[in-house]
Image: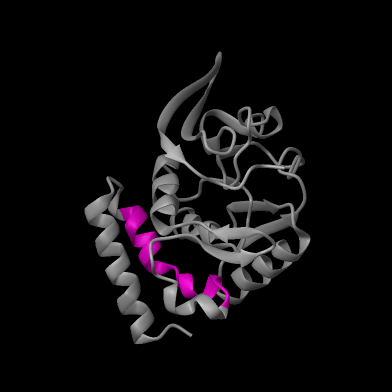
Amino acid sequence: MDTADDEAARQRLVATLRQRLDVSERTLAAIAAVPRHAFVPDRYRSRAYDDRPLPIGREQTISAPHMVAVMTDLLDLEPGDAVFEVGTGCGYHAAVVAEIVGPGTVYSVERVPALAEAARERLDRLGYDVTVRAGDGRDAFAERPVFDAAYLTCAPADGVPAGIVDRVRTGGRIVAPIGRDGAQRLVRLTVGEDGLEREDHGGVRFVPMR
């Protein structure tokens, strides 16, 4: 249930992000629309709108809202874009992206089956039409046409795997943390005819990709 206190806390969070970040109003509106408290364990509900990661079990976390906002904004999405998420977690980031691209266009894979099942049920209960599977991001959704964009919520040590890059169309974007623990960088890759164009967006710390 979304209470008046939840709404007020969410609006305060968005106001803080507006001051701190250079992201679009569309991205901020998506953050404002998603009830983050519904994606965190009950014991953390009072901290749901703090701008920080929180544990969700299975040694995983829900990303800090500012990181979700930055990564979403870097994807430069349009309504109707098909988006591939590697690392569903609790489903919060997928919900934010779905607010921008619309229903039925976000496809997410999670390596921990219990988290995938819980996220699928949660997103469905909240009215988000997101396809969630348990599996390995390197070969998930191989039967689908290529995606317009992809993002990873876990950090591959040596670059985005080819199996994920190959799932994104020419001109599409991939946003991911890359590097070993303690030396990770957030990057945006644009898929070109002759390879990948890379932009570096600073140091981050994510769970390593396994």
Residue 118 lies, with reference to residue 84, above or below; the image says below
Residue 201 in which image quadrant? top left
* Residue 30 counted in the magenta span: yes
Whether residue 78 appears in this view of the structure is: no
The residue lying toward the viewer, choosing from 96 and 155, is 155
Identify the residue at image location x=62%, y=72%. 122
Residue 204 in the figure: left or right of residue 159: left
Residue 73 in the figure: left or right of residue 22: right
Q: Start and end of the magenta stretch?
A: 26-41
Identify the residue at image location x=67%, y=42%. 209
* Residue 34 counted in the magenta span: yes
Residue 78 in the figure: left or right of residue 8: right
Image quadrant in which the C terminus is located: top right
Farthest residue toward the front?
182
Whether residue 24 appears in this view of the structure is: yes
Counting from the top left corner in percent of width and height, residue 117 is at 73, 66
The residue lying toward the viewer, choosing from 16 and 23, is 16
The residue lying toward the viewer, choosing from 10 and 125, is 10
What's the colour scheme?
one colour
Residue 110 in which image quadrant? bottom right
Identify the residue at image location x=35%, y=78%. 7
The residue lying toward the viewer, choosing from 202 and 110, is 202
Counting from the top left corner in percent of width and height, residue 192 is at 52, 20
Q: Main secondary structure of the magenta part?
A: helix
**Circle count:** 0
Farthest residue toward the top?
194
Counting from the top left corner in percent of width and height, residue 98 is at 51, 58
Residue 18 lies, with reference to residue 35, above or below; the image says above
Counting from the top left corner in percent of width and height, residue 100 is at 44, 55
